[in-house]
Amino acid sequence: MDSIHGLLYGLSRAVEPQILILAFLGCFWGTMVGVLPGIGPVAGITILMPFTFGIDLTSAMVMMAGIYYGAMYGGSTTSILVAVPGETSSIVTIFDGHQMAKQGRAGAALALSAIGSFVAGTVGILGLTFLAPPLAELAIGFGPPEYFALALVGLSMSSFLSNASLAKGLAMAVVGLITGTVGLDIISGAPRFTFNSMELAGGLEIVSILIGLYGISEVMEMMASKVRPQIQHEKLWNLHRLLPNREEWRLSIWPIIRGSFMGFFVGALPGAGGTVPSFISYAMEKRISKNPERFGKGAPEGVAGPESANNSGAVGAMVVLLTLGLPYNVVTAVMLSAMIAHGIFPSPLLMARSPDFFWTVVASMYIGNFMLLILNLPLIGAWASLLRLPYRWMTVFIVLFCIIGVYSIEYRSFDLLLMALFGGIGYLMKRVDLPAAPLALAMVLGPIMEKSLIQSLIMSDGSPFIFVTRPFAAGSMALFFLLMFLPLIQKKLGRRIAPVGEVEV
Amino acid sequence: MKENQLRVLLGILALVFIVAFGSQSQAASYPARDVTMIITWGAGGTSDLSCRQLADPLGKILGKSIIPLNVVGGSGAIGMNQGAHARPDGYTLTFCTSGPTVIQPWMQKVTYDPVKDFIPVAQVFGEYLVVVAKADAPYKNLKEMVDYFKKAGKAPKFATPGAGSNNHLSMVLMSKATGLAMTHVPFSSSAEGVNAVIGGNVDFASTEPPSAVGPYKEGRANILAILSAQRLDLIKDIPTVKEQGIDLVFGGWNGILAPKGTPKEIVDKLAEAAKKALENETLIKNSATVGRPIEFLSGPEFGERIKKELARNGEIIKAEGLAPK
Amino acid sequence: MWLMDRISSAVLFAFVIFYTAAGWGLETWAKKAPGPGFMPRLLALALGALAILIWVQAKPSLESRQEVESYSKREPFIIFLLVLAYVFVMPQLGFPLSNFLLVVALRRMVEPGSWRADLAGAIGTVAIIHLVFVQILALQFPVFPVWWGE
C-alpha cells in the first residue's frame, strides 16, 4: 500500500469514535503526566497496562502514542513556569523559557513552545510516513563505533551551551560523565563507586538529579535574593499580551523550522530520543545567532528551537521503535512489548507487513498532534495565571511538586535524597558561576559513550582504528574535533564568526 | 492474690487463642486484599510481559488482583533484595527469573540469599535462548558456524544483553562444549544484540525468542539453534543444539517466590492457584507467543532446582573467572 | 569572581582525589579492551586538569562586593535542610503527615502570616494532594507511618 493510500486509509480508521476517544484520553493524560515532573513514565504505565491486554493492539498503541506525545507538550510547561524540568527533553527550555516567564512573557513562551511543537510534530510525522524504511535500513548498520562518535559530537555541544568559560563548562561536563560511572558497570558487571550500597548499585537516577539541580536550587535561589522581584503580571484578558508579539514570532520562525527537521533526523538515530535534539538545537541557535549574548536571558529562539526539536525527535524515536524495536523510554518500551505480545514485530518492513496497524497509528498521531495544540493553547492563560500566586505558596507548591514527581519515579527515598543533595549542589553552582547545562547533557550521554567505546574496542580487538575505518564514525569524529576546538581555532586566527562568550585557555 | 493470678492466666490464654485463631483466619481469608508481585526487570521487557500475562488468570483464581511492581536495577538484584526483605504475609511476592536468582549471587555482592531468604512457591515458565546470525552469513546452523570459525582460526564475537546474564553464561557453556573460543560483546538488551548481528557488527547473538522471531520470519536473520531440550512451538523448524551434535541443554526459568517466614498455608494456596492458572488457555497461548512455554514445578521441586543450579553456576563462574574483581 | 573560582577549583580538586581513591581497585585494562577503571581514571585526570585551569584563570571580580553581599545565606540553607529532613522523615511518618509538616515549615519560613492561615492552608494542601495523587492516580505513596503497621 503506497504512502498516500495508506495515509488516507489510516485517517479513515483514525476518526472512528473509539480511536478518537482513546487518542484524546492519551493526549490529555500525557499532558498531565508531562506537566508533573518525573512522574511521567511510571504513572503512565500503571494506568496503561490493564488496557493493553483488554483492548486491541491498535487502540492501545494509539493511546500510548498520545501519552508519549502529550508528555512532550506538558513537560515544557513546568520548565517555563517554575524552572523544573518535566522530562530530560525539557531541560533546555528552562534556560530561556523561565527567563521569559520572569519578564512577564510566560504566555508567549508557552505559546511558542506549543506551536513549535505542533509544527515539529507534523514535520516529524511526515518524516515517519515517508522516510521510515530507508532510515531504518541506514540505522541498522549503526554499531558501537557510530554511537560513540555521535555521543562525542553531542558532548562537544556542551561548549556552546553556556556563557561561562570553556574550562568551567568542560569541568561540569566531566562531572556529569562521572555521575554516569556510579553503579554496576554495564560491560563487566563490576560495581563501581557503590560503597556496598544496593541503591548506589542501581546508579544515580538522572531525573532525580535534574529536578534537584534545577527545581530545588531554583527555590533556594528564590529565597536567597533579599529583594523579592515582582514577576510582572500578565494581563490575562488581553490576549495580545499573552501571545508572542511580532518580534518574538520573527525570531522564532527559523529556529522552529530548523529544529523540526534536525530533531527528526537526530531522534531517528537509535538511542537519541527527544533530549539530545533539544540540546543540539539550543547550541545551534546560539551559534548561528547574531546576538548570542541574549541567550540565557529570555531569547524566544532558545525556547522555540529546542521545543520543536524535542517533539520531532520524539517522533523520530518512534521510527526507531517501529522499525528496529529499540525503545527510548518506558512508554515506548511498553508499546514494544504490547506489539510483540500481539505478534507484530518491529522491522523496517513493518509498513508493508502490517499496514493496518502502522497507518492507523500514524494517522492518529497527526490527529493527536492537532488535539494537543487545541488542548494546550487555551490552557496558556490558566498556566500563566499560576505565576501570580503569592510567594509563600509558590515555594510550597514547587517543593512539593518536585518531591512527588521524584518519588513517583521508583518510589525510593534514595531518589529524594539525590534530589535534595543536588538541589544544594545546584544552588552552590549558581553562586560560583558553574554552569549546569553541560552537566545535564553529559549525564544523558555519558553512559552511552562509555559503553559504546568499550564495545567498539572489544569488537576491534583493542584497535582504535575502528573509529576511522568506518565512514560514518570517522566523519562524526572529525565533526567532534571541529566543534570542540573551533572556538579556539577562531581565536587563534583572530576572526570570529559570532561571539560565543569567553574563551580562554 | 490468687484470684488476680487466675485472671492474668485466663487473660493470657485468651490472648493466645485469639492470636492462634487470628493467624488461622488470616491464612484462611488469604488473600484479603490485592497482592503485589515484584518484577525484577523493567516494564516492557519479556519478563515483565510474562509476569503480567500470569497475573491476570492468577488473580482471578485467587479472587483479588495481582499488582505487578517493577523494581529495576543491578541485573535484577535490587528487586530480589526488596522481595527478600518484604513482609512474610503473602502480600508481597517476587516473580523471579533464573538470572538474578542463581547467577547474580556469584557475579556481585548481593544482600539476599536466594535459598535462605525465600520460600519457593512454584516454577511457572521456562525460558529458552536462541542463537541468531545474519541471514547472509556463510553458515546456516550452529554446527556450520562452529566449523566455520574453527577452520578460520578466529574467535567469533557474540552479543548478549549483559555481562552475567543467562545468555552470557549459556554461551560460556557452549564455548566449552564445542571447544571454540568466543569473544563476548555485552549490550543492554536483546533487541540491541539482534540489531548488532543484522548490522554486521557481531557474528552472532544469544537472545530470547521474541527478539529474534521478527527478523527471522522476514528473512533478515537466521536462527542457528535453540538451547532447549526440545524444539519450541514458536519456531518449530529450528533444531536444538543437541540435535546438531553438541551436548548442551540450557534453560532458564521464571517462578514465584515468597519471603522466608510466609505461613505454609498461604504458600500452598498460592502454589495451587498458580498450577490452576497455568491451565488457562489464554495464558498458554500468550506465553507461547513470547517463547516461554509453561513449565510447572511445585514449590519443593523448584527449591531443589534453585539449589542445584546455584551450585553449578558457582563452579562455572569460578572456573572461568567470569566474576568481576 | 576570583574567590569563588578558587573555591570551586579547590572543591573540584578535592572531589577528584576522593573519586580516584574510591575507584582505586578497578582494572584499567582487561583483555584487549578498557576495563571498568578506564573511564573513571580518564575522567579524574581530565577533571583534575580542568580544576587547575579554573584556578589559574581566576580573575579579580568585576562584580561589586555589594552584589555578593545581597544574597542571603540563611534562607536557602534552611530550605535545603528542610528538604533533607523530609527525605529522612517521610518513610517514618508517612506521606500526608510529612507533607503537612513541610508545608507549615515552609510557610512560616517564607512569609510568616497568621498561624491559623498557615495551618489551614497546610491541611488543605495535604488533603488535595492526597486526593489527587494517592486516591485518584493511585500512586504508591506510603500513607501510614511505619510504626502504625498494616
Image (spheres, grey):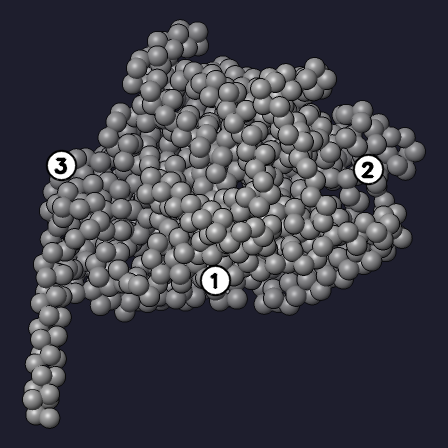
Q: Residues within 10 Å of mark 2 (few under 14, many from 20)?
A: some
Seen at 38% across and 22% down, the residue is: A24
Q: Which amino acid lies under the numbered mark 2 shown in the image of this protein?
A: Gly
In this rendering, does residue C20 appear at all?
no
Find residue B220 and name its label: none
- The residue identified by callout 1 is C88
Q: Tell me whether marks 2 and 3 sit on the same chain.
A: no
Q: Which amino acid lies under the numbered mark 3 shown in the image of this protein?
A: Glu
Q: Most extreme residue toward the bottom, as rendered? A: B1
- Residue B174 location (% of width, % of height): 36, 52
- The residue identified by callout 2 is A501
How far apart marks 1 and 3 lie (CA) works out to 48 Å
Compared across the picture, whether B231 is left or right of A287 comes to left
As rendered, which of B145 and A87 lies closer to the eye?
A87
Seen at 68% across and 37% down, the residue is: A230
As rendered, which of C53 and B226 lies closer to the eye?
C53
Q: Do the CB atoms of the residues marked 2 and 3 lie less than 8 Å apart? A: no
As rendered, which of B94 and A253 lies closer to the eye?
A253
- Residue A73 location (% of width, % of height): 51, 28
Residue A355 placement: quadrant: top left
- The residue identified by callout 3 is B281
In this rendering, does residue B281 appear at all?
yes
Query: Which mark lies nearer to you, 2 or 3?
Result: 2
How far apart marks 1 and 2 lie (CA) works out to 42 Å
Residue A43 placement: quadrant: top left
